[in-house]
Image: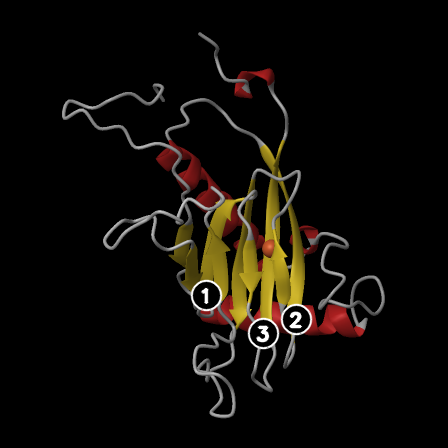
């Protein structure tokens, strides 16, 4: 892709942050199997003994498990990454590896704001999302249980924004549905709001880590 430059009207738009959402086709069958698998793995019925998918979310690599639904998900993630890279305008081969982990959030569980160091892209696939994602009446009305919020990576870019300025919102919040696959640059800070349902929220997150090639280095001058 050519370096950014002023267009014919004299504008140049810099520093884009692109996120991608896909609702994966035919996700119902796969989600039933993924939920069964994650539940069994967490209980230690399959895999490497009992596991904690609420806080110990970086252990192992669930995307290497030999299971048809995992294979389907792995293919969907890779296809989505290819589309993302095409949209970014990359015209040369890029190779990556995937590491995935399951998240099981019970009532009150959340993930603090964080990003994913050492990865290029990160994402989450939503296996089970509890209904009733409005704030319970006893809580403040602006709670967004189960949502995910992303933050403008350019610190304080919003501080002088005015009405109608697209920089006025320093955060972007999405309420995912089962079957959603989200993909974003790994540097992007994000916060997973608490689950306020008695039903579990189950998702599979992943990092795409580049297999390094010197071709990735920007051409200078
Ligand atoms: Fe994350």
* Distance from the alpha carbon under mark 3 to that under mark 1: 20 Å
Residue 37 in view of the camera: no
Question: Residue 61: x and y, percent?
Answer: 71, 52
Q: Quadrant of residue 48?
A: bottom right
Q: Residue at x 81, y 71 (%)?
A: 44
Within the displayed image, which quadrant is ligand 1 positioned in?
Answer: bottom right
Does dot 1 land on a helix, a strand or a loop? loop
Picture layout, residue 82 above or below residue 198: above
Q: Position of residue 156 (x, y in %)?
A: 46, 46
Numbered circle sitting on residue 150: none
Question: What residue is shown with label 1?
Answer: 179
Mark 1 vs mark 2: which is more N-terminal? 2
- Decide if residue 203 is in sight here: yes
Marker disc for residue 104: 2
Q: Earlier in the sequence, mark 3 or mark 1?
A: 1
Q: CB atoms at circles 2 and 3 under 8 Å apart? A: no
Task: Please report the residue visible at 65 percent of the width from the left and 52 percent of the height from the top.
Answer: 100
Q: What separation in Å lies between label 1 and label 2 (alpha carbons)?
A: 16 Å
């Amino acid at each position: 892709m050519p370096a950014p430059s002023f267009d014919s009207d004299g504008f140049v738009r810099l520093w884009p942050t692109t996120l991608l959402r896909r609702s994966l086709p035919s996700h119902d069958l796969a989600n039933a199997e993924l939920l069964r698998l994650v539940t069994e793995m967490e209980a230690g019925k399959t895999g490497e003994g009992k596991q904690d998918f609420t806080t110990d979310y970086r252990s192992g690599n669930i995307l290497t498990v030999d299971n048809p639904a995992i294979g389907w998900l792995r293919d969907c993630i890779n296809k989505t990454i290819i589309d993302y890279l095409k949209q970014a305008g990359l015209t040369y081969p890029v190779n990556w590896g995937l590491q995935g982990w399951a998240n099981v959030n019970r009532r009150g569980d959340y993930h603090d704001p964080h990003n994913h160091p050492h990865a290029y892209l990160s994402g989450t696939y939503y296996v089970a999302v509890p209904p009733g994602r409005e704030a319970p009446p006893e809580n403040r009305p602006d709670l967004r249980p189960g949502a995910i919020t992303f933050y403008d990576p350019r610190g304080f870019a919003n501080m002088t924004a005015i009405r109608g300025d697209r920089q006025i919102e320093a955060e972007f919040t999405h309420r995912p549905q089962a079957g959603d696959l989200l993909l974003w640059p790994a540097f992007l800070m994000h916060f997973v709001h608490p689950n306020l349902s008695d039903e579990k929220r189950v998702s599979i997150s992943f990092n795409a880590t580049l297999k390094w090639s010197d071709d990735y280095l920007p051409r200078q001058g």
